[in-house]
Image: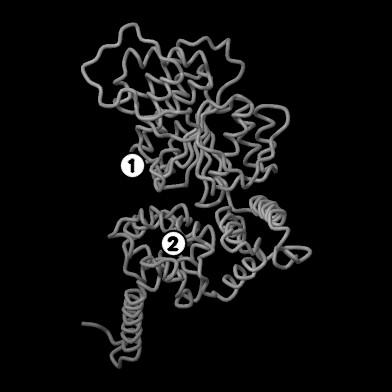
């Protein structure tokens, strides 16, 4: 997927990532509890901090990681316009900061992970942090120490400066994030000799929208943007990946960001569908090799089955990954049978002992759980009207139609949906009369319609309220129509008024 990306940025060949590769987290060997745990009232005389001590010092405060868990799919090694444009901008120094955004499950983390591994292979990875609220990697104070540790491992000159800095001021790790950023990143690079660095180093932040606190997310963006504008001499290139949440859109849409930061949207389009199709073909081939003693069919999967799985995934990496995990489940060790039950699940909604879309359902549950309690019923009602009652409008409803039928203020409607930008394209209030809701992938609606999968988020939960609102609207329309008819047929109609 990123051959052109890697080639333009670094030159030479590109690695071909393994979709099922699961590398361990990068942590130094034999590091246990912090060397300073529980210590107090001590003095360090003429301190020296080697890489192992430095690692312990930082990692016991950061608990950072280089990549998401192994369930994250690696992207297939193919060219994409997104990768080509991003590489071109970075390689030509058109921008030192890039925002890659896109819907939930479309493959942003896969792109970031594959890119990080290729940068590491080519010795130009500065550091990478993959946020995950579910995994506990969402604390703001984890970020800078984790990046600083990785920079120390990758750049000997930086390690020496950072080690002395931490020995002189160990309390810096307890200070505010912007102070950590200045002391641990900016100041060491400010005194380094850039002549010794043969290339810029890439810094990757993936899943920024999962960092704890919207204001902190914006602070991280502003912090990085400011240094790329004011200290353009620093040899650091930043790639930030996230879902298109409203507060992030607002921040990146500011005039100063439009100049200093490049942006790319990872869409579910033809290229993405081709990438996911290749990912599925590679995945099934590996399953066939692994279970060659039990797979009797030839070819497997057959053409119609392969096409159907690709159609179901329809460009969504997380759905494709879930399907492959289900088919190759070692507990059953029966890929042919698992594939048949998977297709039956999609075709007829068959009840299975194990949900084949567990990963996808966890993702959607996680997103919906972020919607405030007071806003969730309104959000579900809006989606329900759009999905279940389009015939009441005689056409696909605009957002204003939905608001009118639910007797909702437009600002209240938009506010209730603001946490769902990663699964829906939502018009701003000023465009409610002209634009409709759009779902990035139909699997989100499938999830909401299935009470077993979605539970308290199922659309059926709000059916009574929606029907009540629609009945009130019908009553209002009938009342107005009767009043107009009575007025039109009144014997006094047309007589002069006193």
The percent coordinates of residue 297 (x first, y second) are: 76, 66
**Which label was assigned to residue 213?**
1
How many residues crowd mark 2 within 10 Å: few (<14), some (14–19), many (20+)? few
The percent coordinates of residue 375 (x first, y second) are: 31, 59
Image vertical order of residue 312 relative to residue 46, above or below: below
**Is residue 174 shown left or right of residue 334?**
left
- Check the image and name the residue furthest to the top: 46
Q: Is residue 259 visible?
A: no
> Which sits earlier in the primary sequence, circle 2 or circle 1?
1
Which residue carries the number 2 mark?
433
The percent coordinates of residue 40 (x first, y second) are: 22, 20
Residue situated in front as seen by the camera: 108 or 360: 360
**Which label was assigned to residue 476?**
none
- Check the image and name the residue furthest to the right: 298
Q: Quadrant of residue 325?
A: bottom right
**Is residue 498 shown left or right of residue 218?**
left
């Amino acid at each position: 997927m990123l051959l052109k990306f890697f080639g333009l940025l670094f030159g030479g060949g590109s690695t071909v990532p393994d979709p099922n590769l699961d590398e361990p987290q990068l942590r130094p060997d034999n590091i246990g509890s912090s060397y300073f745990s529980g210590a107090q009232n001590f003095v360090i005389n003429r301190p020296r901090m080697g890489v192992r001590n430095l690692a312990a010092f930082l990692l016991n405060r950061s608990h950072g990681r280089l990549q998401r868990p192994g369930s994250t799919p690696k992207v297939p090694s193919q060219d994409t316009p997104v990768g080509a444009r991003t590489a071109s901008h970075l390689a030509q120094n058109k921008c030192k900061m890039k925002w890659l955004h896109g819907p939930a499950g479309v493959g942003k983390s896969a792109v970031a992970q594959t890119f990080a591994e290729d940068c590491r292979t080519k010795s130009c990875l500065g550091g990478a942090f993959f946020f995950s609220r579910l995994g506990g990697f969402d604390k703001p104070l984890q970020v800078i120490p984790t990046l600083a540790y990785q920079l120390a491992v990758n750049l000997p000159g930086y390690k020496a400066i950072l080690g002395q800095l931490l020995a002189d001021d160990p309390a810096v790790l307890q200070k505010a994030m912007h102070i950590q950023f200045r002391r641990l990143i900016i100041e060491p690079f400010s005194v380094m000799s850039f002549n010794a660095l043969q290339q810029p180093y890439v810094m990757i932040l993936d899943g920024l929208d999962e960092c704890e606190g919207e204001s902190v997310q914006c602070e991280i963006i502003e912090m990085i943007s400011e240094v790329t504008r004011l200290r353009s001499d620093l040899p650091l290139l930043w790639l930030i990946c996230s879902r298109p949440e409203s507060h992030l859109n607002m921040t990146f849409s500011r005039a100063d960001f439009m100049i200093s930061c490049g942006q790319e949207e990872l869409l579910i389009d033809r290229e993405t569908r081709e990438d996911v199709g290749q990912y599925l073909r590679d995945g099934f081939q590996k399953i066939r090799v692994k279970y060659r003693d039990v797979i009797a069919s030839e070819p497997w999967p057959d053409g119609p089955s392969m096409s159907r799985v690709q159609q179901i995934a329809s460009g969504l990496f997380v759905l494709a990954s879930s399907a492959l995990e289900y088919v190759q489940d070692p507990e059953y060790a029966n890929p042919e049978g698992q594939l048949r039950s998977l297709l039956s699940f999609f075709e007829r909604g068959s009840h299975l002992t194990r949900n084949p879309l567990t990963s996808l359902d966890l993702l959607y549950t996680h997103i919906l759980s972020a919607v405030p309690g007071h806003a969730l019923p309104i959000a579900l009602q809006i989606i329900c009207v759009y999905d279940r009652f389009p015939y009441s409008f005689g056409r696909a409803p605009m957002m204003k139609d939905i608001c009118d039928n639910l007797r909702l203020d437009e600002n209240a409607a938009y506010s209730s949906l603001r946490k769902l930008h990663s699964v829906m394209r939502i018009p701003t209030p000023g465009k409610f009369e002209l634009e409709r809701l759009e779902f990035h992938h139909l699997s989100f609606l499938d999830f909401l319609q299935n009470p077993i999968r979605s539970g308290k988020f199922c659309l059926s939960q709000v059916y009574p309220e929606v029907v009540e609102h629609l009945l009130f609207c019908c009553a209002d329309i009938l009342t107005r129509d009767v009043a107009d008819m009575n007025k039109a047929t009144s014997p006094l109609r047309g007589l002069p008024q006193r």
